[in-house]
């Protein structure tokens, strides 16, 4: 039996696509292996959003190139956001790669693909892409050039996939898109994400629904009402702000001001009490002054996010920012600003989580880790606890006894399982 190995880096969309590739390999008679040295086919799911992610793929390809010298029959396939529409130049740069196929696509070097590819062995939770591509063209972002314009999957297709996943044990689904709340605008009748959430919430056996990533300009009042009114939709929103300074936001082509973002946060929290809010922030964007950086820090202090995904700006060839603006913030300044925001967020998250001490939260149990059960509460907070019972896929009540910035620990409440 031929063997395959998949290496994945980047966003949840890449993780979902890797799961589907693994399922496809299984359907084609391949078996998965942990090490590329044991594989006949190695698939790399790449990310080009950050330079560091791209460098990891390049390093992995160099290792595979040496491996192919010893094993000429080994095949290598590259997909994800590093692959552009015309891979001819990439073939010259990466001659060790046998097959290229774009982000969100399935390989054409195999036989005809079944119409719906699902993860072969889904766990308690699953990612489901609902829309590919992005129409926003933020000045720093390569995604629209690599994944193309927005293309929504149909409601019927998504309902069928959800039904199948739940029948195989999935209890929580996260709907994915580069701009998830743009779903439906290109479909007949122009349904929106609120319509999709309402429909999927009716799925028997499904316990929770999440969705990400949202663009602030597309966070509608109707979607807020769905967050507040649909029991299965978790009160958790990832709302990337990217910067807290109006001039930087303008250069990023984000389409809103810091004040408009803060007003949106206020309306969200009024609509959904107890909302968990996470965001993405880039430090060191071209021309970012110390005063502009401090405006971002101030916004973080005002909003008090539950989690922040921080990144240092790196120019992506082909984007507006890379073509127009010099990457002029010194590396040491970028590193200092990143570390400063990391410390700030650790303090804020620690304070938010500490307030949960003594509370009892409902946890969807996912799996065991180092002898303890792990799962997440409805806001997405990671919770660890001990129990001798088999609890995977179950909802249990856990009293929080200890907290940190990144996770909670507790004890199962008697009768809560």
Image (spheres, grey):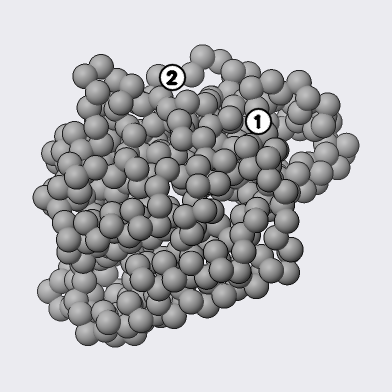
Question: 413 above or below 142?
Answer: below
* Circle 2 Cα neighbour tier, 10 Å, few/some/many (<14 / 14–19 / ≥20): few
Question: 86 above or below 226?
Answer: above
Question: 187 above or below 272?
Answer: above
Residue 355: quadrant of the picture: bottom left
Q: Earlier in the sequence, mark 1 or mark 2?
A: 1
Question: Looking at the picture, how far across and down is residue 135, in whole percent?
Answer: 45, 30
Q: Nearer the viewer, residue 206 or 257?
A: 257
Q: Nearer the viewer, residue 211 or 179?
A: 179
Q: Is residue 35 visible?
A: no
The quadrant in which the C terminus is found is: bottom left
Q: Is residue 152 visible?
A: yes
Is 136 on the left or on the right of 49, as rendered? left
Label 1 to label 2, Cα distance in Å?
Answer: 23 Å
Query: Closer to the camera: disc 1 or disc 2?
Result: 1
User: Which residue is pictured at 53% across the width and 32% down the height?
Assistant: 144
Question: Looking at the picture, how far across and down is residue 399, in whole percent?
Answer: 22, 79
Question: Looking at the picture, how far across and down is residue 17, in whole percent?
Answer: 49, 36
Marker disc for residue 114:
2
Is 376 on the left or on the right of 35, as rendered? left
Q: Which residue is mark 1?
A: 83
Label 2 element class: loop
User: Which residue is pictured at 46% across the width and 35% down the height?
Assistant: 136
Label 1 element class: loop
């Amino acid at each position: 039996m031929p063997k395959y190995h998949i290496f994945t880096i980047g966003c949840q969309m890449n993780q979902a696509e890797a799961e589907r590739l693994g399922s496809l390999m299984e359907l084609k008679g391949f078996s998965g292996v942990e090490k590329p040295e044991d594989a006949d086919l190695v698939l790399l799911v790449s990310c080009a959003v950050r330079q560091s992610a791209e460098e990891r793929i390049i390093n992995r390809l160099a290792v595979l190139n040496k491996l192919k010298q010893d094993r000429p029959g080994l095949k290598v396939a590259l997909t994800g956001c590093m692959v552009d529409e015309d891979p001819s130049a990439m073939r010259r740069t990466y001659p060790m790669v046998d097959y290229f196929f774009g982000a969100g696509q399935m390989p054409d070097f195999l036989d005809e693909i079944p119409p719906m590819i699902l993860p072969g062995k889904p766990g308690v939770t699953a990612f489901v892409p609902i829309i590919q591509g992005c129409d926003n063209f933020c000045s720093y972002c390569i995604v629209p050039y690599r994944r193309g314009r927005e293309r929504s999957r149909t409601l019927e297709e998504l309902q069928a996939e959800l039904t199948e996943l739940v029948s195989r044990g999935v209890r929580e689904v996260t709907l994915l898109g580069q701009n998830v709340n743009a779903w439906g605008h290109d479909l007949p009748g122009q349904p929106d994400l609120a319509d999709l959430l309402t429909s999927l919430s009716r799925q028997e056996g499904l316990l929770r629904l999440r969705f990400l990533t949202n663009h602030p300009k597309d966070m509608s009042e109707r979607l807020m009402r769905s967050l507040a009114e649909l029991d299965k939709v978790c009160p958790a929103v990832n709302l990337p702000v990217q910067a807290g300074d109006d001039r930087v936001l303008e250069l990023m082509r984000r389409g809103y001001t810091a004040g408009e973002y803060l007003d949106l946060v206020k309306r969200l929290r009024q609509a959904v009490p107890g909302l968990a809010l996470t965001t993405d922030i880039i430090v060191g964007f071209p021309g970012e002054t110390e005063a502009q950086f401090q405006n971002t820090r101030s916004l973080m202090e005002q909003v008090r996010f539950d989690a922040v995904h921080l990144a240092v700006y790196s120019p992506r060839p082909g984007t507006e920012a890379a073509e127009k603006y010099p990457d002029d913030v010194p590396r040491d300044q970028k590193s200092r600003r990143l570390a400063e925001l990391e410390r700030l967020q650790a303090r804020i998250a620690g304070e938010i989580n500490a307030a949960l001490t003594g509370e009892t939260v409902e946890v969807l149990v996912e799996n065991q880790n180092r002898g303890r059960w792990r799962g997440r509460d409805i806001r997405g907070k990671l919770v660890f606890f001990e129990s001798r019972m088999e609890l995977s896929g179950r909802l249990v009540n856990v009293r929080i006894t200890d907290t940190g910035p990144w996770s909670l620990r507790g004890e199962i409440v008697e009768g809560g399982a």
